[in-house]
Image: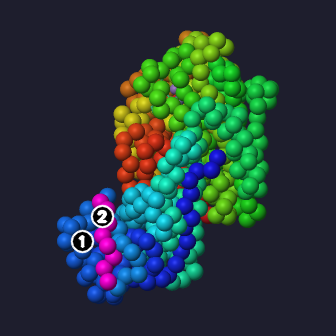
Amino acid sequence: MPGASTPSSYATTSPLKATASVLVLGIADGTVLGLGSAKAARTAVDDAARAIEFSGKAGSTARVPAPRGFSAESILLVGLGSFDPAASSAEALADSHEVLRRAAGNALRVLGGTSSIAVALPTTTAEAVEAVAVGVGLGAYRFLEYRSQDESKVPGAVTVLGPKGRENAAAAERGAVIAAATNRARDLVNTPPLDLYPESFAQIVADQGKDRKLKVTVLREKELAAGGYGGILGVGQGSTRGPRLVKVEYRPKRAKRHISLVGKGITFDSGGLSLKPAASMEDMKSDMAGAAAVVQALFAIAELGLPVRATAWLPLAENMPGSSAQRPSDVLRMRSGKTVEVTNTDAEGRLVLADALADADAEKPDLLIDVATLTGAQVVALGNRTSGVMGAEAARAEITASAKIAGEEMWAMPIPEEMLSGFDSTSADLKNSGPRPGGMLAAAAFLQEFVGDDANWAHIDIAGPSFNTGSAFGYTPVAATGAAVRTLIQVAEAMD
Ligand code: BES
Ligand code: MN
Ligand code: ZN
């Protein structure tokens, strides 16, 4: 499943000498940054920006002919907004890295079809170089698999320019790995459910895992039945395309700690017999964004050679209202042994996650994270760009701190104790749909019933952030965004 990919490399060439067709330069407060002591060149670029009233507002770009003294043919000015080149607090540094990611992303988004691009944004540290490389890789993303023309919109080769030193070249390489993982997650989410269903998703993971010499185990319906995976089977039984549970393992020798990642993988969520209205169903191919994020984060963790044991669990099912579909009032016997009355077949994510969480928790990892497009209530509570993080205090803190560094908006939310009684059932241990108020928190309370009390577990609801139904911005395209991939990689990095 080849997504459009733009090759990138790292060089320490002076921006003036870069022979690209477009040189990308950053402007903050009407002044170009990143040209060092080249005074005449700086003045020429500042004059060009002033002539077109380009002040450097974040998100803005403008193309100008390259002034005398530059080897490039033209210059793309990108706004850095309130960029603080002297940032020193951890918070301010993270903000400045995000400014760089977005600026690079904006540049690559508008440079479709350009044959050669050199990016000379202001970087003095390896972290800043990594941020630019991530923004370049993400901004270059195009999903063209299902278009008959349009090939020309892919940007050509990109060179990231920055300071000398092996650590900077390595940082650019890391940034490219992180962006590629995010882009593979985007490809999976953007792929229509006609082609991406549990079996084909599992096959892609098996192939990509094999390329990376990782152990991939796929449980099919027979094995799921033998293992008592009532949640995954119940959700999957309304579709002709049966469910799967995929496990991917990365076990480096020197690992001391173990992170487990569980991702909701509903390849299409029609709602089941509790059918969704047409407008709510339109983007439900994206209901496997959690599974896509965790598996691609794991692949990146392996590619980066991080010394952390990592396991990904992908419960995959298509939630359809076929004649064999589960019915409201059916009772499922879950993998953990608990029973669940299905009062709403559209609350299916928690059912498949419950089974996978039980298995993941049984291995007693040091950190257990599930990622899911779980509730519409997430969008109501936090909007389209901020994911909700619920669970154990320590796990929540590790995730929100890593999200800040990775440049993703994630916010800690509670699981109020009164939520659980909303799942009281008249026939089973609990029912699957609870009270509407605080729906995101209620869903987390349900999941908590399937992990041990002492588990260092947190749940990330990415319902809104995983799929951009508005316009593209920064390094975020329309449709699949790859939400949570960067944060998960950073969490693993911080565990080292
Ligand atoms: N996949 C949806 C949640 C969702 C909604 C994701 C919008 C992305 C955008 C989930 O399976 C669902 O249908 N949740 C229900 C739960 C309810 C029935 C308790 C919801 O949020 O309405
Ligand atoms: Mn649903
Ligand atoms: Zn769903």
Q: Residue at x 26, y 62 (%)?
A: 57
Taking 315 as reference, is 276 left or right?
A: left
Q: Earlier in the sequence, mark 2 or mark 1?
A: 1
* Residue that carries the numbered disc 2 in the rendered image: 62
Q: Position of residue 472 (x, y in %)?
A: 38, 48
Residue 273 location (% of width, % of height): 55, 15
Residue under circle 1? 49
Which residue is nearer to you in this view: 31 or 237? 31
Q: Magenta part of the protein: which range?
A: 60-68
Q: Which of 421/164 is in front?
A: 164
Taking the spot 76% from the left edge, 31% from the top edge, the residue there is 220
Alpha-carbon neighbours of circle 1 within 10 Å: few (<14), some, or many (≥20)? many
User: Which element carries disc 1, helix, strand or loop?
Assistant: helix
Q: Report the front residue among 160 and 363.
A: 160
Q: Amino acid at mark 1?
A: Ala
- Residue at 43% from the left image edge and 83% from the top image edge: 17
Q: Quadrant of the C terminus?
A: bottom right
In the image, residue 285 above or below residue 207: above
Is any part of residue 470 visible from this angle? Answer: yes
Which image quadrant for residue 340? top right
